[in-house]
Image: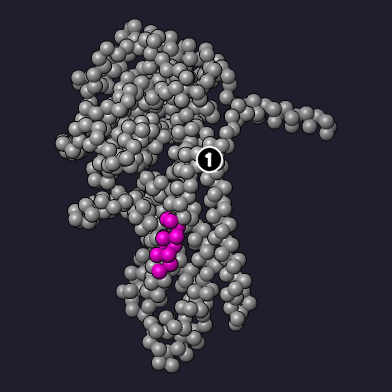
Amino acid sequence: MLKYNFDWSVVTSGKYFEWLASGLGITIKLSLVSIFFAFLLGLLVAVMRMSDVRPIRWIAFGYLEFFRNTPLLVQIFFWYFGSYKILPEVINNWMNTLNFEFSAAVIALTIYTSAFIAEDIRSGIRSIPREQMEAAQSSGFSYLQSMQHIILPQAVRLTIPPLINQFLNLNKNSSLAMTIGVAELTYQARQVESYTFKGFEAFTAATLVYVMLSFVITGLLTLYSKKFRNPMKAL
Amino acid sequence: MKKVSIMVMSLVVVAGLCGSLPAADTLEMVRERGVLVAGVKDSTAGFGFVDEKNRQIVGYDVDFVASIANKLGVKLALKPVTSASRMAQLIEGNIDIIAATMTATPERAKQIDFSLTYFFTGQKFIVRKGTARNLPDLDGKRIGTAKGSTSEQNAARALPKATIISYDDYPQALLALQQGKVFAVTTDESILATLLGNAPNKNQFEIPDIQISDEPYGLGMRKGDKNFADFVNKTLLEMEKSGEARKIFDKWFGPQAATTLKRGNFKITEGNRIVQK
């Protein structure tokens, strides 16, 4: 370690800096797209999980158990390499014309994170007193309407902190996309290392960027807790 | 009592520090240890791969370091490495020598030393039969390769408009090719030939005569390790003279092997060496 010649200019300027910057762009894109769809999907699965209709409940239960208990890396490889064997020829050919690496990574990250978000939302819903649902339904709302207008708005507010946590996890998990060739930040850091042999500088730069991204995300949490504090309860 | 314990502590710390720095003289260290630790590939057919029958790593690279360990009179220990990790592993001292289809380049020679060239090949492409005949056919397409290899950089230089996608290792790149996710896979012809040789649908693919670089393989050793480097080179020259080098080549790439390559006029000689610019 003492014989190493540090050269920070490699990562702060020039074409290698541009690589890292473009990698950062892809990481941010991956995270934002995935968290958006993961939230919607998680919401759907959470509502399904609490349905009175048994088959719907079971499907949701199976979904949650499967995707929470399988390693994310395995899921990424499944969507990128494995899905090819299952899907029909037509879809495969169409997907090959797009940038399938990015899409496969988004699909894997979305589904994986949605399973955790669904459970967080479910505990949010369950912490709303039963009386709310009873009052809503006795006022004439159907199950779905009660969910939509009464229960979920309250539950989602409670779920924001764990959601931010999932966003943090998602952001870090996005680095696994490099295994299927997505040119995100970690991929670019390795690229810089293999071209310049300045591994320490490259990975330090990547680490600092990830830490900065985490600060931004947790900053959102602080913003939320200051502005949207529940008037009924102290959060 | 306190002074003694402080002295003991500092001795332990110093001893610990000494232990963590790789010794400057690998030859001495290996002889003392009784084992030569070689970094090899474990899923590159022909060079370093797992033999299904006895579950050992075998191949062209393995035979070469086995010969060197033999001449040294020590045992051989194999450690699987990847294109991306092999240099780091050597510099950190986890392995003593790299025998992992490593191309000797002047840039790499700034960080480590290379032995005489012990294998010679060139970088080519695997494509679906009939889809590419010369280099311009490949430009602007998606090309798969492995992370950390010279193939990545050479392809990017030769095909500026192409999208280079680097997977973890070559079998994955081939899988991507078979699934139509990439148009071609590029790396050293030797690796391509063995990759394809083991593929189930090899008749649908071919290796056209498009070469974008020369790839001389060298064994990797830590910088400034003169005694070890001299010993290795001497052993390589002896192997060439005795015909052992040729025998190893024929064993893995000769007429009876799964994949045939041409050795041509290649010989391990003193002149075949890449050093830093």
Number of other residues with Cα within 10 Å of mark 1, as a class: few under 14, some 14 to 19, many 20 or more:
few
- From what the image shows, is residue A136 above or below residue B228? below
**Residue shown at the point (39%, 10%) measured from the top left:** B271
Q: To which residue does mark 1 refer?
A: A13
Let me know if residue B151 appears in the view.
Answer: no
**Residue B102 placement (x, y as % from top left):** 39, 26
Between B252 and A145, the one lying in front of the other is: A145
Where does the magenta region start and end? A29-40
Provide the chain ID for the residue under circle 1: A
**Residue shown at the point (40%, 65%) measured from the top left:** A37
- From what the image shows, is residue A173 above or below residue A225? above
Does the magenta portion include B230?
no
**Residue B225 placement (x, y as % from top left):** 53, 17
Between B117 and B212, the one lying in front of the other is: B212
**Residue B72 placement (x, y as % from top left):** 46, 13
**Residue shown at the point (34%, 50%) measured from the top left:** A101
- Report the residue that reaches farthest toward the top: B241
**Residue shown at the point (46%, 25%) measured from the top left:** B107
Amino acid type of the residue tagged 1 in the rendering:
Ser
Magenta region, main secondary structure:
helix
> Would you identify the image quadrant in which residue B32 lies?
top right
- Report the residue that reaches farthest toward the bottom: A139
Does the magenta portion include A39?
yes
- Indicate left or right for B132 with B8 as reference: left
- Indicate left or right for A185 with A77 as reference: right
Q: Secondary structure at mark 1?
A: loop
Q: How many labels sit on residues? A: 1
